């Protein structure tokens, strides 16, 4: 069965992203933001990472145990490629955490710090600690606890696949599905959502392994989940062109990859990972200037998440 057959996808199902730019690292919860946070976030929006770091360091000079400042400083250091320094700040936030929730939040930041270095195993190590926290919340918040466990497992898996550790990626994507499906009734987060995410992941893993037939089989299964649950598809359909473009790229169909990844970037222009994939496609097609433009856009991210964890070191190498 041809790849094109899998791409019969209703345009109306695609949800266009309203995001205009990547968000700076999130460092606080609720209430008015301190002035130093506002100043640093403005510097981030202006692309001045060193200035933002300076603001956080000034705050830490007088308040060394500040959890928001340590988490934010760590995030900026990761963006600058200074992971060892970043993790010193995340450890301070972990040590200073006033409760288990704050500790888990800092551990999740630590996990992502390792992601910026493509360190799948240490990312998994810290994400397991975060999952353990959500296990303690199952009785009190079952609709959130199991979903969060699945999300965090998938987040670890995403770092693993992007770093090339496909075995661990497959293990943790399956674990994420297993955990998410434990939500009582799966009314808030339906079974179709977890099935779609797993098929999406398995397709990408198969493509990375060079197994074209298996990859497109999983693409078809992912599309079937979208077609079978229109409510779920309203939020998740935006990720389908990313999937088809990814599979096409890694199985050698550069023209199809270009078509699909252009759609994906149009839907989510602020996603630095998609910009990288599109840039890689342009490179394969011999269009270096277009590739470099994609990499420049990707390099501007100020997020502290899996897409940024891949994009920052990748574009640093590409752009010199």
Image: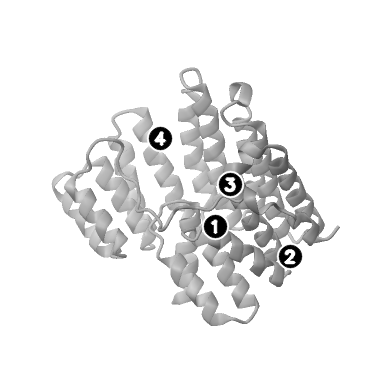
Judging from the image, what secondary structure is the residue with disc 3 in? helix
Q: Residues within 10 Å of mark 3 (few under 14, many from 20)?
A: many
The residues tagged by marks 2 and 3 sit, at their Cα atoms, a distance apart of 21 Å
The residues tagged by marks 4 and 3 sit, at their Cα atoms, a distance apart of 18 Å
The percent coordinates of residue 196 (x first, y second) are 67, 42
Q: Residues within 10 Å of mark 4 (few under 14, many from 20)?
A: many
Q: Is residue 117 visible to the viewer in this orientation of the structure? A: no
Q: Earlier in the sequence, mark 4 or mark 3?
A: 4
The percent coordinates of residue 236 (x first, y second) are 60, 45
Confirm or deny contact between disc 4 and disc 3 (CB under 8 A): no
The mark lying in front, picked from 1 and 3, is: 1
Residue at 30% over, 34% down: 97
61 lies above or below 245: above
The percent coordinates of residue 79 (x first, y second) are 38, 60
Please name the residue that numbered disc 2 is placed on.
251
The mark lying in front, picked from 2 and 1, is: 1
Q: Earlier in the sequence, mark 2 or mark 1?
A: 2
Please name the residue that numbered disc 4 is placed on.
104
Q: Residue furthest right?
A: 1
Q: Earlier in the sequence, mark 4 or mark 2?
A: 4
- Relative side of 121 to 237, left or right: left
The residues tagged by marks 4 and 2 sit, at their Cα atoms, a distance apart of 38 Å
Residue 196's tag is none
Q: Quadrant of the C terminus?
A: bottom left
Judging from the image, what secondary structure is the residue with disc 2 in? loop
Please name the residue that numbered disc 1 is placed on.
267
The residues tagged by marks 1 and 3 sit, at their Cα atoms, a distance apart of 24 Å
Confirm or deny contact between disc 2 and disc 3 (CB under 8 A): no
Please name the residue that numbered disc 3 is placed on.
157
Judging from the image, what secondary structure is the residue with disc 1 in? helix
Residue at 56% over, 71% down: 279
Q: Earlier in the sequence, mark 2 or mark 3?
A: 3
């Amino acid at each position: 069965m041809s790849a094109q057959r899998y791409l019969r996808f209703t345009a109306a199902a695609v949800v266009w992203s309203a995001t205009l730019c990547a968000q700076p690292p999130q460092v606080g919860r609720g209430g008015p933001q301190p002035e130093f946070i506002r100043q640093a976030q403005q510097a981030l929006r202006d692309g001045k990472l060193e200035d933002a770091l300076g603001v956080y360091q000034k705050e830490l000079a007088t308040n060394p145990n500040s959890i928001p400042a340590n988490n934010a400083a760590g995030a900026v250091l990761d963006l600058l490629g200074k992971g060892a320094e970043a993790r010193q700040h995340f450890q301070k936030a972990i040590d200073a955490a006033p409760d288990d929730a704050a500790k888990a939040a800092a551990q999740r930041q630590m996990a992502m710090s390792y992601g910026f270095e493509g360190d799948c195993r240490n990312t998994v190590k810290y994400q397991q600690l975060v999952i353990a926290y959500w296990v303690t919340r199952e009785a009190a918040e079952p609709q959130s606890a199991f979903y969060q466990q699945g999300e965090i497992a998938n987040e670890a898996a995403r770092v693993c696949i992007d770093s090339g550790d496909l075995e661990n990626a497959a293990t943790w994507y399956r674990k994420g599905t297993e955990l998410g499906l434990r939500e009582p009734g799966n009314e808030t987060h339906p079974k179709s959502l977890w099935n779609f995410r797993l098929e999406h992941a398995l397709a990408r893993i198969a493509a990375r392994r060079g197994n074209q037939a298996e990859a497109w089989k999983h693409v078809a299964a992912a599309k079937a989940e979208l077609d079978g649950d229109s409510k779920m598809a309203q939020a998740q359909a935006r990720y389908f062109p990313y999937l088809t473009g990814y599979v096409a790229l890694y199985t050698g169909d550069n023209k199809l990859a270009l078509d699909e990844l252009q759609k994906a970037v149009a839907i989510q222009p602020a996603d630095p990972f998609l910009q990288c994939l599109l840039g890689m496609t342009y490179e394969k097609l011999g269009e270096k200037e277009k590739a470099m433009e994609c990499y420049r856009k990707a390099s501007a991210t100020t997020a502290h998440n899996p897409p940024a964890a891949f994009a920052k070191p990748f574009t640093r190498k590409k752009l010199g």
